[in-house]
């Protein structure tokens, strides 16, 4: 665009617009939902279970319900009290597993103390496990079988494919090794042909490892952990973190796991927070719900 070559000190990374990408995904999903309904007379249904009254979780769950409706699908909300027992929660999941109007089930995490997230997640039928967090779907991903892939890493993968195309041979570094994001992300990048490193709490020199990354995915929950000096010039940076903070004037603000302003001076491309990975997570949840409905109605093709 400019006629003069910008000085390196003026370099600004290209913003990866997850919000716009997610909006176009949702539009496509809406079309596919209508076509699916046309063909089978079935509307995909998503059940979301929220236990307790964490205000941030309530906001997410409401957003999910609104976007599910916008995509032409049915949304069933189950808001349970903090005092819900594991047996009660498992009974609800059993009922939803059997309900033919429900094609996807999601239990919002984290669960209140005393409820075992692993046991609860595994109670969801694998074909309705739209979060992809149960052992069957997690295992399928690990051995390259088709299955339901967790929404956040799937959203990151779609952004990376859109930005980079073929990723074979690129060095991808994932910071964070959670079952929710880091581990499935690393497996997806491996399947793309990347050389993958995973940094975690015991990694000796995460900054030095990060500096080797062509693709850097950060999912730690530590706000602004990754500094500009950690980034290889021109790298693609995906920031999964979301921390809500207050500005000095008392306004609520979201910050990521990457110190955005300094990182943007070095990276080639970077996702903002908000407007990056977050909207992709919800779009992928809708996509997984449609895929789950297609598998249940059209039959397994594996
Ligand atoms: N079983 C389960 N599955 C999840 O996928 C799951 C979960 N539990 N628990 C909580 C986290 C968090 N999460 C987000 C989804 C969307 C945005 C999102 O849309 N963020 C917007 C901003 C939203 C705002 O303004 O608060 C953005 O980044 O632009 C963020 C976070 C899904 N999670
Ligand atoms: Mg179209």
Image (spheres, rainbow, N blue to C red):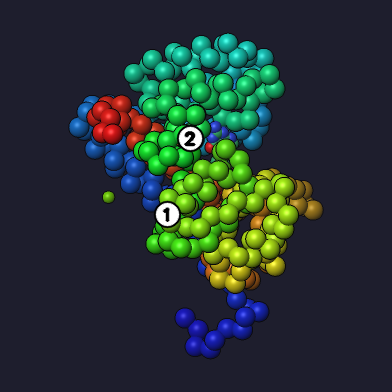
Residue 223, percent from left and from top? 71, 51
The outermost residue toward the bottom is 4
Dot 1 crowding, Cα within 10 Å, few <14, some 14–19, many 20+: some
What residue sits 67% from the left and 48% below the top? Answer: 200
Residue at 73% of width from left, 54% of height from top? 204
Give how far across and how far down residue 72 sits, in percent. 35, 35
| For residue 239, side relative to residue 91 (left or right) | right
Point out residue 254 in the picture as x, y percentages from the top left corner: 66, 49
Q: Name the quadrant containing residue 183.
A: top right
> Which residue in the rendered view is the most extreme toward the left?
39
Taking the image as shown, residue 170 lies to the left or right of residue 241, namely: left
The picture quadrant where one finds residue 58 is top right
Q: Which dot marks residue 138?
A: 2
Residue at image x 60%, y 30%? Answer: 109
Marking on residue 192: 1
Q: Residue at x 49, y 88 (%)?
A: 3
Q: Position of residue 167 (x, y in %)?
A: 43, 61
Q: Secondary structure at mark 2?
A: helix
């Amino acid at each position: 665009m400019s006629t003069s070559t910008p000085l390196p000190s003026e370099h600004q990374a290209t913003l990866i617009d997850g919000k716009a990408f997610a909006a176009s995904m949702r539009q496509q999903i809406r079309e596919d939902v209508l076509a699916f309904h046309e063909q089978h007379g079935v509307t995909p249904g998503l059940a979301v279970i929220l236990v307790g009254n964490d205000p941030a979780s309530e906001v997410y769950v409401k957003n999910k319900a609104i976007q599910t409706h916008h995509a032409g699908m049915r949304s069933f909300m189950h808001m349970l009290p903090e005092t819900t027992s594991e047996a009660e929660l498992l009974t609800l999941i059993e009922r939803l597993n059997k309900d033919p109007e429900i094609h996807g089930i999601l239990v919002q995490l984290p669960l209140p103390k005393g409820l075992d997230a692993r046991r609860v997640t595994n109670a969801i039928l694998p074909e309705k496990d739209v979060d992809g967090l149960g052992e069957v779907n997690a295992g399928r991903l690990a051995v390259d079988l088709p299955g339901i892939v967790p929404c956040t890493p799937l959203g990151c993968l779609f952004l990376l494919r859109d930005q980079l195309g073929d990723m074979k041979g690129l060095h991808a570094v994932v910071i964070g090794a959670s079952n929710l994001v880091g581990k499935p992300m690393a497996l997806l990048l491996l399947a793309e042909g990347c050389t993958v490193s995973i940094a975690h709490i015991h990694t000796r020199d995460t900054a030095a490892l990060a500096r080797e990354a062509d693709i850097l995915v950060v999912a730690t929950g530590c706000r602004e952990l990754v500094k500009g000096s950690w980034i290889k010039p021109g790298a693609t940076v995906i920031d999964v973190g979301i921390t809500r903070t207050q500005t000095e004037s008392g306004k609520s603000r979201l910050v990521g796991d990457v110190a955005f302003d300094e990182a943007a001076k070095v990276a080639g491309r970077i996702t903002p927070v908000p407007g990056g990975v977050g909207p992709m997570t919800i779009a992928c949840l809708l996509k997984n719900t449609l895929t789950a409905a297609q598998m249940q109605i059209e039959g397994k093709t594996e």
